[in-house]
Image (spheres, helix red, strand yellow):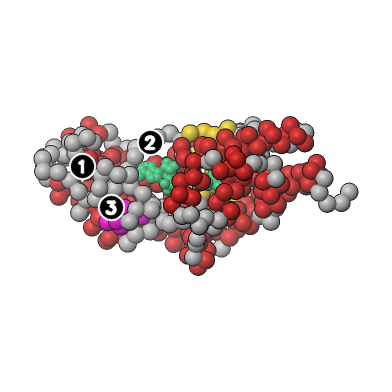
Amino acid sequence: MKKRILTGLQPTGVITLGNYIGAIKQMIEMQENYESYIFIADMHAITVNQDPIVLRENIKSLVALYLACGIDPKKNTIYIQSDNPYIGGISWMLECNSYYGELSRMTQFKDKAKKNANFTSGLLTYPVLMAADILSMDADYVPVGVDQKQHVELARDIAIRFNNKYGEMFKIPEPILKKVGTKIMDLQTPDKKMSKSSENQKGVIRLLDDIDVIRKKIMSATTDSEMVVRFDPENKPGISNLINIYSSLTNKSIEEIEMEFKDSNYGNFKSRVADIVVDVISNIQNKYNEILNSDYLDEILDSGMNKNIEISKEFYQKMKKVIGLGRN
Ligand code: AMP
Ligand code: TRP
């Protein structure tokens, strides 16, 4: 039997070329080897302020974009967190078995609370909702970046504690640290990672950017004065970043690329990188538009919702019973 993995995605902002190369390609590999569940963590998104109209739009858009990138709905169960009426109740039952002390010590909470002193109580209990996502889907593994590893470890602690108090209920999940693949850097400030939340739009390529804008962003990427297409991240971060992008999208090695462009100037090189990026992204955008405007998307989300509810409802009922809630 295949092991079960669970991935949660927050529907905030349009994903970048960095996300595509760094994370989605890895998910596409993993869908072959695991029973995979992917969900949109919209209830996590509202732990900080969100514009309701933008949030609602981002949810289906993000699903369509992942499908367009190659996430296969036959190999993944895909659902929206808030479509499940049990998850809030499960989270509450876990909250009453978690401690203020451990939650207030979480690194992400401390960072976010420092930035905005007016934080919600949801920001504090965020990791418990995450534990509810994981435990109520009986996940074996949770692929995460380093920033989320501590939350998966807390989910383990909560599961062990619950099992000890009320009898065997939850599987103890394990975090899988995502491979640190090629890090794509900001096109304008190539010593910084290309990030969804970056202020300077010119340095970041988003998968739903206008194609002409994408080309312009690449053509105006920061380079250096050496005028040689050579991989040297320390001294030539801009050119090395473009080589990495080209290499990731064509599967050519760095040596091959250096050879290919040994007689080219930066303008020619950038223009080839732009061709490839535009080619990949316009393909994704075409599929995205097709999916977003079809009934297919709702069919996938309905079937994911039903499976998610079926599994977690059973946990909800068993948890209520052992805790002593409700009627006999
Ligand atoms: P974020 O959008 O920052 O929450 O990142 C989601 C995932 O995308 C992370 O786990 C990273 O693996 C990946 N990722 C984000 N930005 C980049 C980047 N610039 N280069 C490579 N991978 C990235
Ligand atoms: N907190 C995660 C993030 O911001 C998203 C998430 C919510 C999640 N619930 C999850 C990830 C459960 C893995 C498992 O990236």
Earlier in the chain: of badge 1 and badge 2, it is 2
**Numbered disc in front, either 1 or 3:** 3
Could you tell me how far apart the alpha carbons at marks 1 and 3 are, in whole angstroms? 14 Å
Q: Position of residue 159 (x, y in %)?
A: 67, 36
Whether residue 201 appears in magenta in the rendering, the answer is yes
Label 1 sits on a secondary structure element that is helix
Near-viewer residue (238 or 284): 238
The amino acid type, in three-letter code, at marker 3 is Gly
Q: Position of residue 144 (x, y in %)?
A: 50, 39
Ligand 2 position by quadrant: top right
The residue under label 3 is 203
**The N terminus - image quarter:** top right
Q: Position of residue 178 (x, y in %)?
A: 46, 36
The amino acid type, in three-letter code, at marker 1 is Ile
Earlier in the chain: of badge 3 and badge 2, it is 2
The residue under label 2 is 181
For label 1, being within 8 Å of ligand 1 is answered no
Q: Residues within 10 Å of mark 3 (few under 14, many from 20)?
A: many
The residue under label 1 is 239
Whether residue 7 appears in magenta in the rendering, the answer is no
Label 2 sits on a secondary structure element that is loop
For label 2, being within 8 Å of ligand 1 is answered yes
- Looking at the image, do the residues carrying marks 3 and 2 touch, with CB atoms under 8 Å apart? no
Could you tell me how far apart the alpha carbons at marks 1 and 2 are, in whole angstroms? 18 Å
Residue numbers of the magenta segment = 200-206
**Which quarter of the picture shows residue 247?**
top left
